[in-house]
Amino acid sequence: MSAEPAANVEQAIRLLVAAALLAGSLYVLMPLLAPIVWASIFVISTWPLYVRLRRRVRSVSAAATLGALALLVMFALPIALMATSLVDLGNSALAYSRSREWPGAPALIADLPWIGEAIARRWNEAVADVPAFLASLRQYEPQLREFLLRVGRGLGQSVLLLLLAAVFAFFLFRDAERLGSTLQRAAARIDPQQGLKLLDVATATTRSVVYGIVGTAATQGLLAAIGLAIAGVPAPLLLGLFVGMLALIPIGLTGVIMLPACAWLFLEGQFGWGIFLTLWAVFVVGGVDNFLRPLLISRGSRLPLAIVLTGVLGGLLTLGVLGIFIGAVLLGVVYVMLREWAETPALPPALEQKPDAPADQPLPR
């Protein structure tokens, strides 16, 4: 066997061994992929704040511990608030429904074609005897119990994922500089000209997308809580938290919480506050999304809102809640990379014609 075929065989063996090792590593890491991605997104997004914290603390391990605890507090606090408030809100809603006389079905509902009469009849039966209506719902107890079990299982998995993400965030914070230098060397080896630039683009895009999605959702939730509190709606903080969670999906889902709150005010006879909350929900809570999200996203990279929206919806459908961020970040990074590649001159700088050179002057060789 000559030297050249032998070298080709050895190269093929190396590639097969590397591919096998990579596949095995991915298989082992697959159950932990979600918390690793959560931790990575959190570390990239909060890195400027972590740098300031590390300068003050002057201890890498202590700063990394505080960063991991910040991840726990940021996500565990809303979960705890929801768990404690939902029970009280449910009991209050049940007591309220038993003590109040509900109006009959509006004529607009009854006049709906095909289904209006059935809905109006069911509505009137429910408001005529609320306890009997609640008792009729007992046939759905198995489905409700199964739903509650799924919710509890999901919350347990979320808590475990959060704990693992905090652990990985600690190591990522602590070893970020070493990992960053390794990534830079790998990017430079893959593409010596554009590798480092595209790595910076990926980091900036990740940060801007997270800021745009989370920052806008948090602002909408806060504004919703303020409006609900001013209008006198019960549990404004909890409802504002739900608004913020729904606002992570930028398709106008905040109305799922705000519109029933407005309807409750109208049913209570508080027409002035109902009109106020309706205008607040449409122009303040809903309107802030039109300028704040593009502003925050465009600070790190010029991403069209359609790219972010497509990534959010596609990621949500394929990967669940985690996909909201992963989908938007992936599409954003790919879009920016394609844009950078398209804007890169096709010819080397030495072969490009200078703007002030005559048209008939030959290019330098």
Image (tube, rainbow, N blue to C red):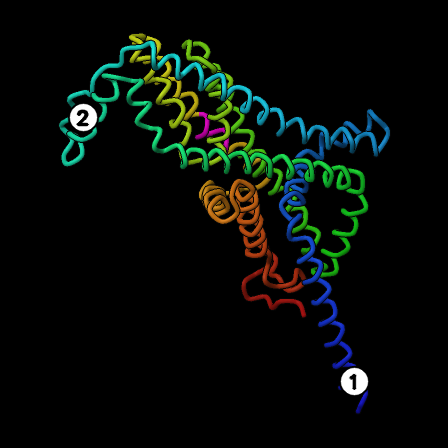
The label nearer to you, 2 versus 1, is: 2
Could you classify mark 1 by the number of other residues whose Cα lies within 10 Å: few (under 14), some (14-19), or many (20 or more)? few
Residue at 77%, 55% in the rendered image? 185
> Which contiguous range is marked in magenta?
288-293
- What is the number of the mark on residue 6? 1
Q: CA distance from mark 2 to mark 1?
A: 84 Å
Question: Pointer 2: what residue?
Answer: 121
Residue at 66%, 58% in the rendered image? 27
Q: Is residue 331 above or below residue 167?
A: below
- What is the number of the mark on residue 356? none
Q: Nearer the N terminus, badge 2 or badge 1?
A: 1
Give the main secondary structure of the magenta stretch: helix
x and y, in percent, of residue 175 in the image: 80, 42
Which quadrant is the N terminus positioned in? bottom right
Q: Hey, what amino acid is under mark 1?
A: Ala
x and y, in percent, of residue 208 in the image: 59, 37
